[in-house]
Image: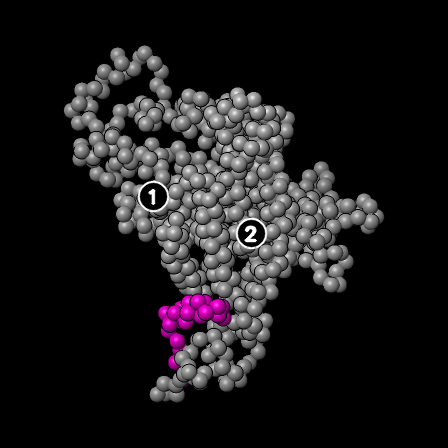
C-alpha cells in the first residue's frame, strides 16, 4: 500500500485524455512548487549513497568495466599478439610481469584483464536472458493465474529439481562448449528463480485498487502489466538481477574450470585457475590472482545487491 | 497433514517424468551411435554388435532376447518414445541401465559403490556447517555491532563470493604444500583421494579438507540466517516479558529465543544436506573424491550417458524426498505452520 506514495507521476490509466490535458499545465506552476520531485529512484539513490560498502562496490564494478572495455589500448601483452615465448615460461612476479607468466610464457596480468571481458559478458548476458524469460513466465503465471500458473510453476519446479550446476554441465555437454552456449545454458536455466520473484511481486500488487481502476477505464492487459504492475515490482527484479550477475560469473568460472565452459585459448578467469592448478606447488600465483579477480568482482555485485535491496525496500523506507 | 503429504508425493510424478524426459531427449540430441561409444576404435563382429544393441534397447527383440527382423532381414530400430517408456519402466524397477564403458557394468552398482563416499562427506560437512554457522550467527546477533559481528559479516560476505573449487585449491596449497615444506614434512594434510587400506593416513584425515571446502559457503548462509532470525526473535514482546520477569539474558536466549530462531536455520541445513547428497561436483573433482558428483562429471566428459541419466535421476529423487522431509519436519518444529491452505499451492 505504501508503494503508491512513491510514485509521483499520476497513474496513467486513471484519467481521461481530456482531464490529463486540463491538469497538465497546472502541475509545474502551482501544485508542485512546494516540494522537490521525489521519485523511487531518487529516494533510493539518496539511501544508497549513505551505504559505504555499496558505493565502494559501484566504484569497483565501474573500474572493472572500464578495464575490460579499454584493455586493448594499454594491456602489456595484447590478445593474439606474439605472446608465447617458452623461454619466458612461469617467470615469477616482476615489474615487467606483475602477476608472472604462465606455462607458455604469456603475461598473466594481461590474461586476467582480458578474462574480465568474458566474465562480465557472461554475467550480464546470462542474467539478461534469465530475466527476460523469467519476467514473461512470471507475468503469465501471476496475471492470468489458474492453468497458466499451474503449468508454469510446475515447469519451474522441474527446473529447480535439478541440481543447478549439474544441469548446466549436462546442457553444455549436449550443446558443446563455447562462450555463446555458456550464455544460453546459464541464462535459460536461471529463469525459474526470477519468475518466482516477479510472480510474487505481481501477486502483491495485483489486488490493489488502482489496478481495478485502470481495468475499469478499459486499459488492456499488456498496458496494465507494463505501465502499472511492472513499475511497482521492478525494485525486486533489479535487486535480484544484480545479485544474479555475481552468481553467473561464479557459475562460468566453475564451468570453465571443469573444462565445459569457455574454450581455451580465450582467457576466462575459470580457465586461468584451471591452468594454474597444474603448477600449484611451484607457481601458486597463477591460480591465486584470477581467483582474487573473481572474488572481488562477485563480492562487489553481492554487496551492491544488498545495498540496493536496503535502498529500494519499501518496508524499510522510513526506517 | 496427511493430505498435504499425499499431494506433495503426487507432485513428484510430473517432476520425475519431466526430469527423465529432458535428460532422455538431451542424450538423443547428441550425435553419435552408442555402439561407437562402447566399442571405441575396435571393430565388433556383427553378432556381438547385435547383442549389444539388444542390451541397450536400441533394436527390437523378442522375449528370449533374440532380435526381430523385418522382411528384408534387417534389424528393427526401437522408436525413441518406446525406448523412453522402457527406460522409465526400468527405473521404477530399480534398473538404471548399463554403463557404456566400464565393461557394461550396471549403473545401479556403480552408484551404490560411489554413494557411501558422498553421504559420509556430506554428513561431516553438515556437522561442521551447523556448529560453525549457528555459533557464528549467535555471536553476531547477541553482540550486535561489536567487532565480532562485523568480522562475521565480513567473512560471510567474502565466503559466498568465493568459488568453492578455488577455496579447495587454496587449502590444498596451504595444508598440503606450504605446511609440508615449512615443517620439513613433519605435518601436513592429504589433498587427494579418500584414503583406503594402503593409504598414508587414517581414513578420517582425508575428510578434513574436502569437508571444510564443502561447508564453507553454506556456513556463511547459515550464519546470516541465524543472525537475522535471532535478531528478529530478540526484538519480540515475549522476550521483553521474559527479561522483565527477571530472567537472565543467558536464560532468555537459551530457553526462549534460540528455539524459535533455529527453525528456519534447521530448514536451510536440511535443504543443503539434500544438495550435498546431489554430489558436490566441484569439491569432489578438486579433491579426487570417489563420490557421485565426481563420477557423474567423469561420465559427462566421457559421454557415458546411462551413468549421467541414472545418477541425475537418483539425485533428483533424493533431493525431492529430503525437501519433503524438511517441509514436514518444519510443521512439527513450528506448530504455527499449517499446510494445505490455498496460499501454499504453487
Query: For this rendering, which residue is in front, A184 or A116?
Result: A184
- Which mark sits nearer the N-terminus, 1 or 2? 2
**Residue most extreme to the left:** A18
Query: Splitting the image into 4 quarters, where does residue B344 fall?
Result: top left
Residue B124 lies, in percent from the top left, at 63, 50
Range drawn in magenta: B74-97
Report x, y in % for residue A278.
Answer: 68, 53
Image point (57%, 37%), residue name: B223
Q: Where is residue A128 in the image (x, y as percent from the top left)?
A: 42, 43
**Residue A91 percent coordinates (x, y):** 73, 46
Any mark on residue B276, and which?
Answer: 2
Q: Is residue B188 visible?
A: yes
| Residue B341 - label | 1
- Describe the element under mark 1 as helix, strand or loop: loop
Horizontal relation, residue B50 to residue A101: left or right: left
Q: Residue visible at 49% across and 52% down? A: B322
Amino acid at each position: 500500500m505504501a508503494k503508491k506514495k512513491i510514485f509521483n507521476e499520476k497513474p496513467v490509466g486513471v484519467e481521461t485524455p481530456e482531464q490529463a490535458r486540463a491538469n497538465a499545465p497546472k502541475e509545474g506552476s502551482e501544485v508542485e512548487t512546494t516540494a522537490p520531485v521525489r521519485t523511487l529512484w531518487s529516494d533510493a539513490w539518496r539511501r544508497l549513497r549513505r551505504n559505504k560498502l555499496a558505493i565502494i562496490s559501484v566504484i569497483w564494478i565501474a573500474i572493472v568495466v572500464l578495464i575490460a572495455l579499454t584493455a586493448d589500448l594499454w594491456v602489456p601483452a595484447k590478445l593474439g599478439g606474439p605472446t608465447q615465448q617458452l623461454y619466458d615460461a612461469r617467470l615469477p612476479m616482476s615489474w615487467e610481469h606483475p602477476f608472472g607468466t604462465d606455462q607458455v610464457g604469456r603475461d598473466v596480468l594481461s590474461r586476467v584483464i582480458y578474462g574480465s571481458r568474458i566474465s562480465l559478458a557472461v554475467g550480464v548476458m546470462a542474467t539478461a536472458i534469465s530475466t527476460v524469460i523469467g519476467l514473461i513466465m512470471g507475468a503469465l503465471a501471476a496475471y492470468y493465474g489458474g492453468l497458466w500458473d499451474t503449468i508454469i510453476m510446475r515447469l519451474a519446479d522441474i527446473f529447480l529439481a535439478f541440481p543447478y550446476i549439474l544441469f548446466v554441465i549436462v546442457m553444455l555437454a549436449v550443446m558443446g562448449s563455447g562462450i555463446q552456449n555458456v550464455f544460453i545454458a546459464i541464462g535459460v536455466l536461471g529463469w525459474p528463480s526470477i519468475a518466482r520473484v516477479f510472480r510474487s511481486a505481481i501477486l502483491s500488487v495485483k489486488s490493489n485498487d488502482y489496478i481495478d481502476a485502470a481495468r475499469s477505464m478499459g486499459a488492456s492487459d499488456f498496458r496494465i502489466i507494463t505501465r502499472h504492475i511492472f513499475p511497482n515490482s521492478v525494485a525486486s527484479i533489479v535487486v535480484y538481477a544484480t545479485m544474479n550477475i555475481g552468481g553467473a560469473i561464479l557459475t562460468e568460472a566453475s564451468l570453465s574450470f571443469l573444462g565445459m565452459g569457455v574454450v581455451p585459448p580465450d582467457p576466462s578467469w575459470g580457465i586461468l585457475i584451471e591452468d594454474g592448478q597444474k603448477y600449484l606447488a611451484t607457481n601458486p600465483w597463477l591460480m591465486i590472482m584470477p581467483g582474487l579477480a573473481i572474488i572481488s568482482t562477485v563480492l562487489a555485485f553481492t554487496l551492491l545487491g544488498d545495498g540496493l535491496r536496503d535502498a529500494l525496500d519499501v518496508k524499510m523506507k522510513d526506517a | 497433514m496427511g493430505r498435504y503429504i499425499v499431494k506433495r508425493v503426487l507432485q513428484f510424478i510430473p517432476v520425475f517424468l519431466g526430469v527423465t524426459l529432458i535428460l532422455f531427449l538431451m542424450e538423443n540430441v547428441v550425435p553419435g551411435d552408442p555402439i561407437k561409444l562402447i566399442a571405441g576404435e575396435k571393430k565388433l563382429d556383427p553378432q556381438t554388435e547385435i547383442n549389444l544393441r539388444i542390451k541397450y534397447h536400441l533394436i527390437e527383440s523378442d522375449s528370449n532376447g533374440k532380435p526381430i527382423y523385418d522382411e528384408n532381414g534387417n534389424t528393427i530400430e526401437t522408436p525413441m518414445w518406446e525406448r523412453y517408456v522402457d527406460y522409465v519402466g526400468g527405473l521404477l524397477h530399480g534398473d538404471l541401465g548399463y554403463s557404456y564403458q566400464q565393461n557394461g557394468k550396471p549403473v545401479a552398482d556403480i552408484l551404490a559403490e560411489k554413494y557411501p563416499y558422498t553421504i559420509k562427506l556430506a554428513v561431516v560437512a553438515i556437522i561442521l556447517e551447523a556448529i560453525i554457522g549457528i555459533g557464528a550467527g549467535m555471536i553476531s546477533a547477541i553482540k550486535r555491532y561489536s567487532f565480532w559481528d562485523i568480522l562475521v559479516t565480513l567473512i560471510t560476505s567474502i565466503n559466498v563470493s568465493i568459488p568453492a573449487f578455488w577455496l579447495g585449491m587454496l587449502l590444498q596449497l596451504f595444508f598440503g604444500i606450504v605446511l609440508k615444506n615449512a615443517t620439513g614434512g613433519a605435518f601436513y594434510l592429504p589433498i587427494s583421494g579418500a584414503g583406503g587400506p594402503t593409504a598414508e593416513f587414517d581414513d578420517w584425515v582425508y575428510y578434513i579438507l574436502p569437508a571444510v571446502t564443502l561447508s564453507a559457503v553454506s556456513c556463511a548462509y547459515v550464519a546470516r540466517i541465524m543472525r537475522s532470525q535471532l535478531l528478529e526473535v530478540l526484538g519480540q514482546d515475549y522476550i521483553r516479558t521474559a527479561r522483565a520477569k527477571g530472567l537472565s539474558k543467558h536464560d532468555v536466549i537459551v530457553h526462549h529465543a534460540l528455539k524459535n530462531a533455529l527453525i528456519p536455520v534447521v530448514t536451510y541445513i536440511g535443504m543443503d544436506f539434500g544438495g550435498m547428497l546431489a554430489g558436490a561436483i566441484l569439491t569432489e573433482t578438486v579433491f579426487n573424491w570417489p563420490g557421485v558428483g565426481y563420477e557423474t562429471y567423469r561420465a559427462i566428459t566421457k559421454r557415458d550417458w546411462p551413468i549421467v541419466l541414472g545418477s541425475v535421476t537418483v539425485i533428483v529423487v533424493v533431493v525431492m524426498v529430503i525437501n519433503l522431509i524438511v517441509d514436514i519436519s518444519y510443521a512439527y518444529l513450528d506448530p504455527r505452520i499449517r499446510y494445505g491452505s490455498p496460499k501454499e499451492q504453487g
